[in-house]
Amino acid sequence: MNESSAGPALLLALLLPLMAPIAHSAARLPDDPLERRCWLQYTADRTSVSLFADSTPVTFSNLRDGFHVRTPFWVEFGIRGMGVIPAGNKREKSGHHHLLIDTPMPNSVTEPIPFSDKYRHFGKGQTATAIDLPPGQHSLRLLFADYDHRPYYVFSRKITVTVTGPRNATPKPRINPEHFSESCALWYQDEVSTPPAESRAVYLKNLRDGETVDSPFLVKLGAVGFGVAPERTSIPETGHFLLTVRKNRTTVSTVHLGDGQTEAVLDLGPGDYDLEFSLLSGDHKLLLRDQLRLSVASQASAQRR
């Protein structure tokens, strides 16, 4: 179980702002039975914890190689073991994301990454973006870089997506019960790549209200309309994440991602939980907050981990 290492004073400072109302805008499971069945089919893929030390620390949180998407489509950035901070702010083991589109990796590790349509910079500490590409196949790769846009050479695997057409002129895929597997895959790919309607939100990228998971599981956090930066920074329009886990209204775990992290692993016993996720400013003022309920079906034993 992940417990906050903050002392009582800091913990109180973190929790006092959270008495404000909760937005309750967390995405819910689909009402349609076929769509719900399809969404839940991918829960394990979205929440699994990698056991391989050499697995890439940078990932696309929502996309996979071979996806079919309508444009514009939503691209979510994941980073493990490092923190996010806007460009121009020097900090060890921290940086910001770059999206490489239909282009190879830059050759130099000492020169800043170029600015172009092929090398898209997210120097405000963004955790995701909507991009608009012409129909056809496109290669995508994420590259993490420092305050001066010099690559750490911490990068994702290259993936290829197929853009099927404009979102406003291409029908949304539907699930056909007679061809469930194939149609479910296309519906799901469209569902996770649909840009959010909110202009400002804090959200969980990989979970919806009412889902059931096996523990331990990965939680991926995102913000819309804000960038990410560590605590005790005063960068405008940025914040850092705080997770609070409650069972029967009692707090059982608090995970303070004060170094600008965007992912956390939770290890909880079987049962029902309320997971509250907040975005706090550098001085711990509440910016955004929401929550969802989830169930843990089983917990792996220590011998199996």
Image (spheres, rainbow, N blue to C red):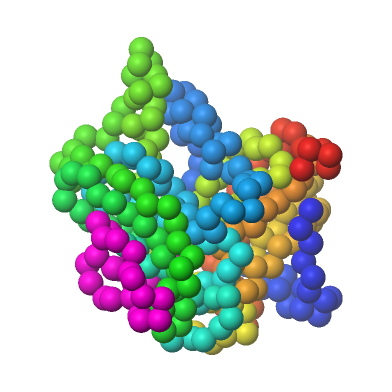
Q: Is residue 172 above or below residue 258?
A: above
Q: Residue at point 38% right, 30% down?
A: 185
The region drawn magenta spans 101-128
Measured as percent of width and height from the top left, residue 202 is found at 51, 61
Q: Is residue 3 above or below residue 88?
A: above
Which image quadrant: the C terminus? Answer: top right
Residue nearest the viewer, comparing 207 with 160? 160
Residue nearest the viewer, comparing 23 with 27? 27
Residue nearest the viewer, comparing 88 with 249? 88
Res. 179 in view: yes
Q: Residue at point 56% right, 83% down?
A: 91
Secondary structure, magenta segment, majority class: loop
Please, which residue is most extreme toward the front here?
107
Kindly indicate the quadrant of the structure image that contains residue 4: bottom right
Q: Residue at point 56% right, 52% down?
A: 55
Q: Residue at point 61% right, 42% down?
A: 48
Measured as percent of width and height from the top left, residue 49 is found at 63, 46
Total labels drawn: 0
- Taking the image as shown, residue 141 lies to the left or right of residue 205, namely left
83 inside magenta stretch = no
